[in-house]
Amino acid sequence: MDFELSESHRLIQQTARRVSKDVIAPRAAELDITGEYPQDIFQAFADTGLTGLTIPTEYGGSGAGMLALALAVEEVAKYCCASGLMLLLSALPTQPVMIGGDEKQKQWIGKGIASGEIKGAFCLTEPNHGSDAGNLETSAKKDGDDYIINGEKMYISGGTVADYIICFARTQTNGASSAVAGPKGIAAFIVETNSPGFKVAGQDRKMGVRGVPTADIVLEDVRVPRENLIGGAEGQGFNHAMMTLNSCRPVVGARGVGLAEGAMTYALEFARQREAFGKPIAELQAIQFMFAEMAIAIEAARLLVYQGAWRVDQGLYSREHAAYLSIAKAFATETAVKVSSDALQVLGAQGYMMDHPLERHYRDARQLMIVEGTSQVQRVVIARALLERELVYP
Ligand SMILES: Cc1cc2nc3c(=O)[nH]c(=O)nc-3n(C[C@H](O)[C@H](O)[C@H](O)COP(=O)(O)OP(=O)(O)OC[C@H]3O[C@@H](n4cnc5c(N)ncnc54)[C@H](O)[C@@H]3O)c2cc1C
């Protein structure tokens, strides 16, 4: 067992740290206020190769992998969780193609994302189907060589700036009286956002992570050629969605770890300066123990996230391996909420004010327990793995 990062992982970590300090940190508070997508930060990610970390070299990326992306996202999220999400979006709408796509699809999406020429969004959630995505209703009816897609997708991160979406839809073949029910009826399509009938119907007003807009997307008779059906096979879409979510869970966790590290570090510096009862509050044991608790949780979360990302890089992210990734996601994101809350508490009234980043970190952290499978859904996965003896401690 080796806990040392490789030289290439360390270089990626250092690159992300530099971009975070130079480009992201000065802009983080402003992004939260304006809610405008920061194209300059995206460009900095693309220019430094960070958008291509999970894309294999033959498709235009560096093939550095999911641990590399987790390390980069951790650095970014120390200052700005929204920018961490931006970087995560180099993988979330790419993985379905890398997992299930054909050669042409991989070249198209891989090269576009790695170079920063295109952006994607992952469209699974619908107004009536979030956690139970296997029952989604968006339809894709076969029409000659094409599919006609109709439906609505909700809370889509990056939906306002995407050039393409991965749209999960229920297929209905020519002449069939109804679509195939349940997860087996779902296909995944690459849909270009300039297609007639594709509409961004609204942008959400949300609690945090404001730098990456979240959109309501409507598809009205959007015609998609068969060559955009991922892997050329109907019925595989739900599997592509689950495999994608499994593989990205450690990176959502990395957003939590970075956020928690940033929040704790900020509060620690504050505690060294702020005086109460004639001495710095950092000298009060009650405050010291709060920091010790934060560090315990952060270190545990960090190891789980790195291990999870490493497992993804070993190809261990199918259903029978999912529990480890869910544990990492649940623990790291809940750590982010707890640590950012405690760090805010250390600042007293000042922590509640927008003059400091802690109230933003706290609002941002709250998103992490909901996205890409809620904390409850992660526990469903973990409990199932225990009952089915996939997660065993012999
Ligand atoms: C800021 C933001 C960005 C997002 N970005 C995207 C995106 O880019 N693409 C995308 O497709 N989606 C996105 N989502 C949607 C997100 O994935 C869903 O919100 C999430 O999967 C939960 O679905 P839901 O909100 O419909 O809640 P529901 O599924 O309605 O769940 C409501 C509550 O019931 C609980 N619950 C549901 N089922 C179970 C169960 N079986 N056991 C125990 N508890 C259960 C949940 O944990 C939750 O507490 C985003 C959401 C947010 C907030």
Image: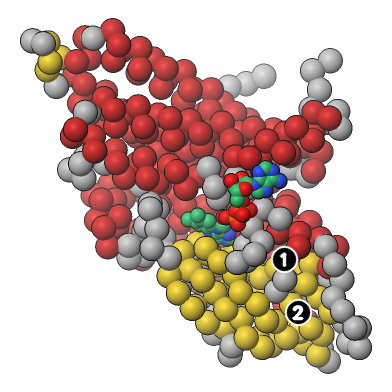
Indicate the position of residue 393 as horizontal and vertical percent values: 79, 18
Indicate the position of residue 136 as horizontal and vertical percent values: 72, 66
Which residue is label 2 attached to? 140
Is mark 1 in CB contact (under 8 Å) with mark 2?
no
Q: Quadrant of the N terminus?
A: top right
Q: Which residue is located at x 11 percent, y 11 percent?
A: 277
Q: Nearer the viewer, residue 48 or 180?
A: 180
Q: Which residue is located at x 69 percent, y 33 percent?
A: 324
Q: Is mark 2 within 8 Å of ligand 1?
A: no
| Dot 2 alpha-carbon crowd within 10 angstroms: few under 14, some 14 to 19, many 20 or more | many
Which residue is label 1 attached to? 136
Residue 319 in which image quadrant = top right
Looking at the image, which residue sits at the far front? 128
Indicate the position of residue 88 as horizontal and vertical percent values: 52, 52
Which type of secondary structure does the marked residue at label 1 adopt?
loop
Q: Amino acid at mark 2?
A: Ala
Q: Quadrant of the C terminus?
A: top right
